[in-house]
């Protein structure tokens, strides 16, 4: 049997006093006094009768009613303007970005990107000003069994407002890249292979007096390929967009501490190539041995979401 509202016992319904229910009134119209005073002005003007004193008295009545009506709703909490228009605690943007493109309020300095870095140096690049990053790794033809890797990162500084809890670090990232393998040194024969990869790392470090202490990270594979001498030349282009929480990593944080939250573009070019007899590979040159990977990224915004507060 389906129980209707009328069938439910009265005790199941919350009880409110008349005064409590009156607080639900919305300012959708004007008071009765204002309506009647306005009608009196309309009549006086339509009839064009009476003295100027009569019209003045009617207008005074309208003015008094209007002031009372305005006072009635003057402090009505329709919405909290400062709260709605203040910059969101979770939102961080590049130093050079126009904050008005993200939110109609001034951007606090501590909600702009705070650090950029690369490993190793050029041609790798990262910028906290515009939120871009570029990483390039190449196996040198003169050392065809050598591995190469590179990273470029952009980060923000974050200090929690609670004593202990969990945050979700969620950057928006747009990437493009290229994986290239050309092993054209025939008739020399080789064993082994090359592996090219591109990934995004989301990491958290605690800021300490001597630098940074890694607290944890999440690696997200973007693209990879493995090739040996049997494959022809290949240039594999790719692009991906991660937005709206598609990239997310949880971290435990504590109040009174400062953290660096970073988005890192990482590429690698690894090789296990040898001669077909297991000796070091010979016969390679800049024209017949080309193995590299690169990826560039644009990071327009980062979000730090409070997922759980264990100790306020």
Image: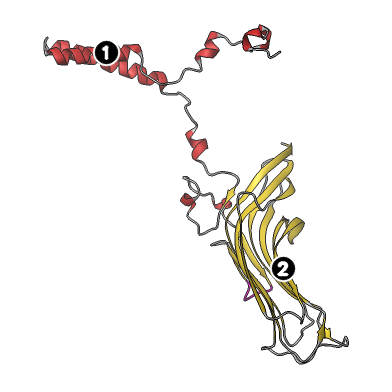
- At 51% from the left and 16% from the top, the residue drawn is 23
Which SS does the magenta portion mostly show? Answer: loop
**In terms of sequence position, does the residue under pointer 1 or pointer 2 come before the other?**
1
Can see residue 198? no
Vertical order, 295 against 105 (above or below): below
Relative image position of residue 24 (x, y in whole percent):
50, 18
**Of 100 and 214, the residue lying toward us:** 100
Q: Along the horizontal axis of the image, is 113 left or right of 211?
A: left
For mark 1, give the secondary structure: helix
Residue at 69% over, 73% down? 120
Q: Position of residue 10 (x, y in %)?
A: 65, 7
Q: Residues within 10 Å of mark 2 (few under 14, many from 20)?
A: some
Considering every residue shown, the one lying at the far front of the view is 1
Q: CA distance from mark 1 to mark 2?
A: 78 Å
Q: Position of residue 71 (x, y in %)?
A: 38, 20
Q: Is residue 30 above or below residue 265?
A: above
* 62 to the left or right of 269: left
Magenta includes 123? yes
> Closest to the observer: 173 or 62?
173
| Residue assigned mark 1 | 37
Which x, y percent locates residue 45? 16, 16
Q: Which mark is residue 224?
A: 2
Q: Nearer the viewer, residue 255 or 24?
A: 24
Let me know if residue 207 is in the magenta part: no
- Residue segment shown in magenta: 120-124
Q: Is residue 117 among the parts visible in the rendering?
A: yes
Give the crowd class for mark 1: few <14, some 14-19, many >=20 residues within 10 Å. many
Q: Is residue 105 left or right of residue 268?
A: left
């Amino acid at each position: 049997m389906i129980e209707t509202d009328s069938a439910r016992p009265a005790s199941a319904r919350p009880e409110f006093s008349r005064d409590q229910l009156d607080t639900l009134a919305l300012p959708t119209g004007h008071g009765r006094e204002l309506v009647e005073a306005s009608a009196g002005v309309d009549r006086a003007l339509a009839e064009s009768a009476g003295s100027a004193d009569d019209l003045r008295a009617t207008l005074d009545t309208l003015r008094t009613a209007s002031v009372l009506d305005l006072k009635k709703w003057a402090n009505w909490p329709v919405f909290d303007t400062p709260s709605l228009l203040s910059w969101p605690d979770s939102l961080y943007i590049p130093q050079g970005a126009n904050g008005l493109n993200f939110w109609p309020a001034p951007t606090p300095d501590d909600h702009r990107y705070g650090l950029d870095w690369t490993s190793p140096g050029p041609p790798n690049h990262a910028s906290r000003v515009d939120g871009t990053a570029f990483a390039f790794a190449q196996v040198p033809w003169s050392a065809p069994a050598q591995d190469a890797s590179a990273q470029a990162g952009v980060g923000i500084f974050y200090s929690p407002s609670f004593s202990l809890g969990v945050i979700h670090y969620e950057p928006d990232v747009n990437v493009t890249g290229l994986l290239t393998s050309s092993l054209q040194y025939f008739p020399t024969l080789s064993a082994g292979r090359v592996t090219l990869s591109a990934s995004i790392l989301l990491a958290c470090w605690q800021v300490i007096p001597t630098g940074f202490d890694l607290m944890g990270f999440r690696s997200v594979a973007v693209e990879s390929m493995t090739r040996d001498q049997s494959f022809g030349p290949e240039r594999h282009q790719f692009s991906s967009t991660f937005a709206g929480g598609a990239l997310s990593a949880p971290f435990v944080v504590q109040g009174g501490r400062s953290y660096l939250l970073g988005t890192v573009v990482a590429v690698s070019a690894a090789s296990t190539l040898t001669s077909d007899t297991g000796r070091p590979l010979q016969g390679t040159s800049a024209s017949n041995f080309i193995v590299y990977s690169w990826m560039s990224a644009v990071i327009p915004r980062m979000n730090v979401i409070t997922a759980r507060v264990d100790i306020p």
